[in-house]
Amino acid sequence: MGKIEWAMWANEQALAAGLILLTGGIVGVAGQFRDWEFAAYAIAAGVFVCLLEYPRGKRNKGTSVERTGQYCFTVCVKSFGPLTRNYYVRAFLHAAICVPGGFILATVLGCVCLGIASLIYLAAAIRGEQWEPILPRKESARKPVGESIKLPPQNPPPRPPAEMRRKRAEDLEAAAYVNPITVTANDD
């Protein structure tokens, strides 16, 4: 059984929490809830969390799948260096951001989700994980395509095994199949 990469789970949780916080903030401001100023804060916090968490980090093992359009966000997040790479910082940041969301009903769910993401980031930091950006591969790093892949098959499926395929020869007798089953005429 492989090692669990907690940061991957924290990233998904924090992005969802940012969206929930943003939505709750919009509801709180549009509905003019009491203490709606906390909802306005939640809008700004939700946008910040979404921008911070949109780029996925590179996995330690396996294939890292980046989100659509993540490259420009990756460059921005990478530019902050250790502040965004270190998961202790992210855990503390998310814990601090989620506190004001607990003061208004519209943003409580986003606050709880962001708190859970903060705990998952703390678990990732304790296990020594850190954020590494997924950068585009260089074209020279790709393996060259084999000759057999460039040419499509000559005959449609189902293809007979190699030893049963028709031999190309000028001599028709040499190119003919040898039928393993005897053929007899049925006279009924």
Image (tube, rainbow, N blue to C red):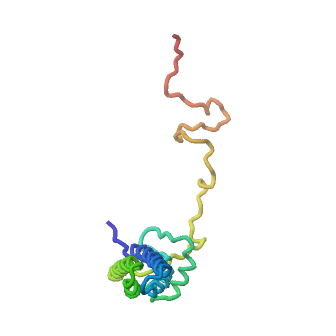
Residue at x-position 61% and y-position 47%:
153
Residue at x-position 61% and y-position 42%:
155
Residue at x-position 39% and y-position 73%:
9
Whether residue 175 is visible to the viewer of this picture, yes or no, is yes
Q: Give the answer, above or below, for where 74 lies relative to 165.
A: below
Q: How far from the left and from the top, in percent, is residue 87? A: 39, 83
Extreme residue toward the top, this view: 188
Q: Quadrant of residue 142?
A: bottom right
Q: How far from the left and from the top, in percent, is residue 96? A: 38, 88
Q: Nearer the viewer, residue 162 or 137?
A: 137
Which quadrant does the N terminus fall into? bottom left
Q: How far from the left and from the top, in percent, is residue 97? A: 41, 86
Q: Quadrant of residue 89?
A: bottom left
Whether residue 132 is visible to the viewer of this picture, yes or no, is no
Q: How far from the left and from the top, in percent, is residue 167? A: 60, 37
Q: Give the answer, above or below, for where 55 lies relative to 148.
A: below
Residue at x-position 41% and y-position 81%:
130
Extreme residue toward the right, this view: 170
Q: Nearer the viewer, residue 122 or 158?
A: 122
Q: How many marks?
A: 0
